[in-house]
Every structure is written in structure tokens, then in C-alpha cells.
Amino acid sequence: MIDTGQKIKQFTGCHGNAEISTMALDANETRLLTGSTDGTVKIWDFNGYCHHTLNVGQDGAVDISQILILEKTILVTGWERAIAVFRPQNFNQFFIQPEEWKGGIQHHHDILCAAFLPPQTVVTGSYDGEIVLWNNSTESAHHVLHPDYQRLLKSKLDTKPQKLLSAGRSHSTHPVADQSTMGVRNFEIDTEGKNAVMRLCFLKARKNTAVTGGANLVSCGGSGYVRFWDIYKKQLLAEFLAHSGAGTIIMSTDKMNRYLTTGDLDGWLKIWDIEEYCLNSSKNKITKAPTLIRSFQPHEDRISSLEMCEPGGQLLIISSSADCSICVTGVCNAPVWIFGQAKHWHIENYLFLPKRDTNLVESEIQKEISLFSKEESCLDPTEHSLLNKKNKDDSTYNVRPSEDINLGIKYKERSTCMKETQKPYYGEVIKKSFSAFRSLSIGVLEELPEVNKPAFLLDPEKYFRKEPEEERPQIPEAPSLF
């Protein structure tokens, strides 16, 4: 329960020994869908009964990254170039095979995420940084967006050549137009994941962007960048570096699109005010970041999922991590709670309505930090310690779980054996340093002064020779009594 952190129900062994990589709820929130690294999606009720198994990987292992539930279809993405589509009206048996996606394959690299904008727009993001725009009704793709270029796709029924909208900055291996009529026009394909699209979010609260302009789609991923797009004008309006040197990032936004939350591989979480950001179209791309409200570190490892919700009208951020913890906190003035603790909290006693002012004064920050040291706090002093306060900005500090917090498994013992953290694409590895040294210098060793050998080394016979055994007097035998 989000109010107290108490565990209500637990399903175990849902996919055998395979890891659960993503989850989703249906529209009525009566069915839970779990996607796994074994290439299947299972549909559960809350009594723990599995109704169907969707065979996404075609009996092969596929790391499923997202399940997108629409009105008539279920779209599944995960390290494949094609979209796996399932139609619930055809679920007449336990094992369900994927059906054909009419649009075919439009991505050059694996699809990592997807998002839906009513009434019929679907977008998918891939490892090479391309965002493909689809019509969900016809299942056809019509445009590709990329930080370096945008292009129009030619449908299967269209015999006219593709139209180039804007040129990229460099060359590539994939032609995007009819070579017989336009010549070869190539773009560089990102094979290192620098522009990988890990999350896509539509700004659904901005309802008039088709007329007034402005951003209505946000993407994030490789190299720590966040980008704002106008999908109607097919234009990149803004991009900014949210997490420097942190590799790939993920994000989430609230229903009113006032705040954007981002999380990185090191467990850092940042909250941005985007209510007034990119509301209008402009010829020049914006590179200035929106107002940073809060920056802190609730986890010790990669943040794997982020959600924003408003129970009782209070905006909360829920984050899960590879350190086996799930945390919840508020936007401005709230401590960090960790689910599954022996002592339950009462979250309504510690939440404050978020300030609408874009500038956080220092007094507000000090008030926020002081919440952690109060004796009447919902957590014991041993359960949360405020460490390594930083001076990057007025709202930046570390919050790390201590040894006393029960994470379900001994993460700290496991982390000492893990010297490498896997990047979420193509098996590349980020090597993290666990050393206490900042730098090492190598120089010429000075000659040691001559050392006199000790006496026992110069004359070992004197100190280590064996002493001769002394002759023992013989004891006369006792006289016999008989």
C-alpha cells in the first residue's frame, strides 16, 4: 500500500527463473501483465491465476522492454526491430501467438519503447535514436524523427518516392529515398547507442499544440539527454543534458504535464518544472534546461522504472532500482520512504503541496532537508542517513539506504561481487570504480640504504644447531616379590 508501505500480496515464480523486465495494468486495472526475459508476457488476475501466456519471442529468449495496452490491441516491444501485436478478441486459448503488424519493419535497430496519443498515433523509439510515427488504425508508418534529421516514409501503397524533409549532418549506410529519382541520400546510423530512445512520453495535457504549436512529445535515453518534439510539424524544439556522464536515462511525467522526473544508472533522480517549457514553436532549437526543482540519490544502483501518481491529490514519485528497493517521495517537501519495511509509515502526515513557483529559495531547501532529522519522522534515524551533501545547486543532496534497511536480499553483499553494471543495450558494459584512490603516480624508486644482516643470518649454526641428546641413567628393575 502506498499509504503505509505495507506489502499486500506477492506472486512468486511467475516466469520460473527468468527475470521480470516490465509490467502493465489493463484499462480496468483488473489484470496484471508481466513481461520477462524468457520472451513471454503473462496475464494474471490478482488472485495469482494466469489466464494467458503471450509468446512474444516465438519460443526464444527476448528481453521485453515495454507492454503498451490499447483499446483493441496489445503492443509489445523488446530488442526486436518489429512490433509484436496481440488482439484480445482472439484470445480463445491459453498460449497466444503474435499476429501480423501490417506496417512491417521500419526500424533499422531494436525497438526499446513506445507511446500512444489518442485517437490513433503510436510512436516507437529504437536503439539508433529514430522515432517512428505510426497510424494505429491502419498500422502504417508515415514519418521518422531523429535528432539529426526527419524523413517521410513511403507506404506500401504509395508508388511515389520518399520526400526528404531535412538533411542530416553526416553520411550513413541506409538510403531513405528512391535512388532512381532522387539519388542516394544516406544518414549515419548510430551503432553506439548515443541517441538510444529509452522512454517516450506524450504531453497529453497540452491539447491545443496542433493549432498553437509547441512540444507534445518527450524522449530520453542515450548520453543523458532529454528532447522535446512537435510531432505535428515534425520538429525537434528543445534538447538539454539532464544527467551528465550518467549514460542512459529514463523518465516519467505527471498527468497534467507540470513535472518531468528523470533517473540515471547511478541512482540519481531529478525533478524538472516543464509546465511553461516549449509551449511555442521556434525556428531555433532550445538548449537551455527547464527549472530544476530537486536532485537527489534515493538508490545505490540503476533506476529501472519511474512513475508519477496523485493519490488524494498529492503528487508522488515512485522509483524502482537494481539495488532491489522501491522508493516513494514527493516533488518538493517530502522525505524518501522505502517499501517493505517492518515499521509502516503514514504518508499523509508528511506530504506538502508542491510549490508552483519555479524558484526554490534556500529556506525551502533547508526545510526539506530538516525533515530527515526530525525525531517524529516516519522512518527511524538508522533507516535513512543524509550523506555527502553537494553544492552543485541548492536542491542537490544524497539520500542512501543504510545497512539496517531490509531490501529483501542482501544487496550490499551482492554488489561487492559485481564490478560491472550492464548497460541496457547490446551487452556493452559500464565499468564502475569501487576504489578509494583518486589518482596513482609511478616514479623512480629511491635506492635503499645498506642494511646489516642480523647475527642469526650471519652465524645460523650458533643459533639454530641442535643440542646433543644427554644420556639418561638407567633405572634398575624392581626386585620381584615372588
Image (cartoon, rainbow, N blue to C red):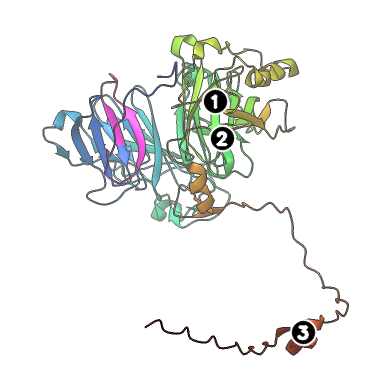
Q: Nearer the viewer, mark 3 or mark 1?
A: 3
The disc placed on residue 260 is: 1
The kind of residue on which mark 2 rests is Val
Asked if the magenta segment contains residue 13, the reply would be yes
Quadrant placement of the N terminus: top left
Above or below, comparing residue 26 to residue 458 in the picture: above
- Residue at image point 54% right, 54% down: 419
Looking at the image, which is closer to me, 343 or 34?
A: 343
- Place of residue 308 in the rendered image (x, y in percent of width and height, measured from the top left): 47, 22
The answer to whether one can see residue 173 in this image is: yes
Question: Circle 1 sits in a helix, a strand or a loop, which is it?
Answer: strand
The kind of residue on which mark 3 rests is Leu
- Residue at image point 85% right, 79% down: 451
Q: Tell me the crowding category of disc 3: few under 14, some 14 to 19, or many 20 or more residues within 10 angstroms, Cα based.
A: few
Start-end of magenta stretch? 11-34
> What residue would you read off at disc 2?
226
> What residue would you read off at disc 3?
457
Tell me: 415 left or right of 447: left
Measure how far apart labels 1 and 2 are at the Cα level. Answer: 10 Å
- Do the numbered discs 2 and 3 sit on residues whose CB atoms are within 8 Å? no
Q: Tell me the crowding category of disc 1: few under 14, some 14 to 19, or many 20 or more residues within 10 angstroms, Cα based.
A: many
Measure how far apart labels 2 and 3 are at the Cα level. Answer: 71 Å
Which badge, 2 or 3, comes first in the chain's sequence?
2
